[in-house]
Image (cartoon, rainbow, N blue to C red):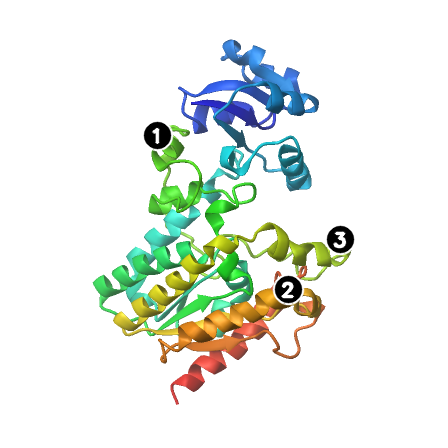
């Protein structure tokens, strides 16, 4: 396979010698500092002529042949800017593979595998589990629930991977003696239109390959994807000690307790992301079937599903696409008719959740998680009366 690599000078040696398959061919390696990159690749002098500066990114994209564009970046300050340039210069989604890592952050690609392995070892301890995207990952505080919760919610995760993870959890629960009582099924108003594997510019699929050997609808065949990486890298396994069950993906950042100036300025832009950018209408039918299958799976395992729509900011509720919201409730109501035991905890109009409980238009802070989880726990306890 011939690839165009977009990375950074300090990372390039790590990427080429410890991450990617040594048999990969490069049409170009684009970095911010070509001299530093060549110094860091002094043991690979045959690649020096392939190194180009960022200001020639456009020419590299337009004038070189490649089967895929690989992007590695850990610098959040420039990450989105580079993504926008890559799109502007004509790289299609079905040529792009996004992987955010550096030597210090590579472990995040192996957290999902570690977390599932942890559950396998401790399945007998849990009475509830939760799946979903960032709203569930950030919005639940494990310490506020009476029953022990395994929150496997993860940012940018869709129904498909939620369901695959749920199947794994039910299998391990059965093996451990069947202690599960509730499945918390995370929702979002855009969820029926969302497909993680199609958001190749934003989401990394490596974690799902490592943990589930599954890429769903990703454009690259799974064997071809596997061959991008060295076997040693793919076999990385993180230890199970010191797992923080309230933050298993390290997504809860105590420094982001309140909404800052930039987040307030970008409120509408953030809302539009889920209406105009990360939306795939052709996946609605599939997602409806997946949710139906998910609820059926819960019934077959005598676990009660609680579907959860978390509160969002007043601005999000005011400006989110009304048509899409109506469709969301219509589809949800239609699915529920076949699953009378499934309940909906609808936080859309839940009172008291002002901007002070969010870090931006739709991401929750730690105060939000504590308050919301207390209310949700009371709701769950009420189901047993």
Which label's residue is closer to the chain start, 2 or 3? 3
* Mark sitting on residue 262: 3
Instruction: Decide if residue 51 is on the left or right side of residue 182.
Output: right
Query: Which disc is residue 231 wearing?
Result: 1
Note whether 382 is above or below 313 in the view shown: below
Quadrant of the snapshot with the N terminus = top left
Left or right of 266? Residue 117 is left
Locate residue 55, reporting x and y percent: 70, 23
Question: Gap in Å between the C-alphas at discs 1 and 2?
Answer: 45 Å
Q: Nearer the viewer, mark 2 or mark 3?
A: 2
Point out which mark residue 24 bears: none
Q: Are marks 3 and 1 in contact (CB under 8 Å)?
A: no
Q: Is residue 227 above or below residue 156?
A: above
Indicate the position of residue 328 as horizontal and vertical percent values: 52, 68
Q: Quadrant of residue 343?
A: bottom left
Of callouts 1 and 2, the N-terminal one:
1
Residue drawn at (56%, 73%), measured in percent from left and top? 372
Q: Residue at x 41, y 84 (%)?
A: 383
What residue sits 40% from the left and 30% below the top? 229
Q: Is residue 383 above or below residue 58?
A: below
Q: Position of residue 321 (x, y in %)?
A: 64, 64
Which of discs 1 and 2 lies nearer the camera? The answer is: 2
Residue bearing mark 2 = 321
* Outermost residue to the bottom: 385
Which of these two is toward me, 34 or 25? 25
Label 1 crowd bin: few (<14), some (14–19), many (20+), radius 10 Å: some
Crowd band around label 3 with a 10 angstrom C-alpha radius: few (<14), some (14–19), many (20+): few
Looking at the image, which residue is at 53% across and 38% down?
93
Judged from the image, the secondary structure of the residue bearing numbered disc 1 is helix
């Amino acid at each position: 396979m011939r690839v165009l690599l977009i990375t950074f000078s300090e990372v390039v040696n790590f990427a080429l010698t410890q991450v990617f398959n040594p048999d990969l061919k490069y049409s170009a390696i684009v970095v911010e500092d070509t001299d530093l990159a060549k110094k860091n690749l002094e043991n690979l002098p045959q690649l020096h002529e392939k190194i180009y500066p960022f200001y020639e990114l456009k020419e590299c994209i337009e004038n070189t042949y490649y089967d895929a564009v690989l992007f590695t970046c850990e610098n959040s300050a420039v990450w989105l800017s580079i993504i926008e340039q890559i799109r502007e210069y004509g790289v299609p989604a079905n040529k792009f593979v996004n992987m955010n890592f550096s030597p210090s952050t590579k472990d995040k690609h192996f957290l999902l595998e570690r977390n599932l392995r942890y559950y396998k070892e401790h399945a007998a301890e849990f009475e509830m589990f939760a799946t979903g995207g960032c709203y569930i990952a950030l919005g639940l505080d494990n310490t506020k629930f009476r029953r022990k919760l395994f929150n496997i919610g993860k940012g940018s995760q869709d129904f498909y991977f939620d369901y695959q993870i749920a199947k794994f959890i039910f299998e391990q629960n059965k093996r451990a003696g069947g202690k599960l009582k509730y499945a918390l099924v995370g929702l979002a108003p855009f969820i029926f239109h969302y497909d993680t594997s199609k958001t190749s510019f934003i989401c990394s699929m490596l974690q799902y390959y490592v943990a589930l050997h599954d890429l769903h609808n990703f454009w690259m065949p799974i064997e071809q994807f596997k061959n991008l990486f060295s076997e040693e890298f793919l076999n990385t396994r993180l230890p199970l000690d010191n797992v923080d069950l309230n933050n298993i993906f390290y997504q809860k950042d105590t420094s982001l307790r309140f909404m800052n100036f930039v987040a307030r300025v970008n409120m509408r832009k953030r809302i539009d992301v889920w209406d105009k950018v990360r939306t795939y209408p052709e996946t609605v039918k599939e997602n409806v079937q997946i949710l139906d299958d998910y609820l059926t799976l819960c019934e077959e395992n005598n676990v009660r599903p609680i579907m959860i729509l978390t509160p969002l900011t007043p601005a999000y509720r005011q400006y989110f696409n009304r048509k899409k919201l109506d469709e969301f409730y219509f589809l949800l109501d239609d699915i529920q008719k076949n699953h009378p035991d499934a309940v909906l905890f609808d936080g859309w109009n839940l009172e008291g959740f002002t901007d002070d409980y969010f870090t931006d238009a739709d991401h929750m802070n730690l105060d939000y998680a504590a308050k919301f989880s207390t209310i949700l726990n009371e709701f769950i306890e009420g189901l047993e009366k």
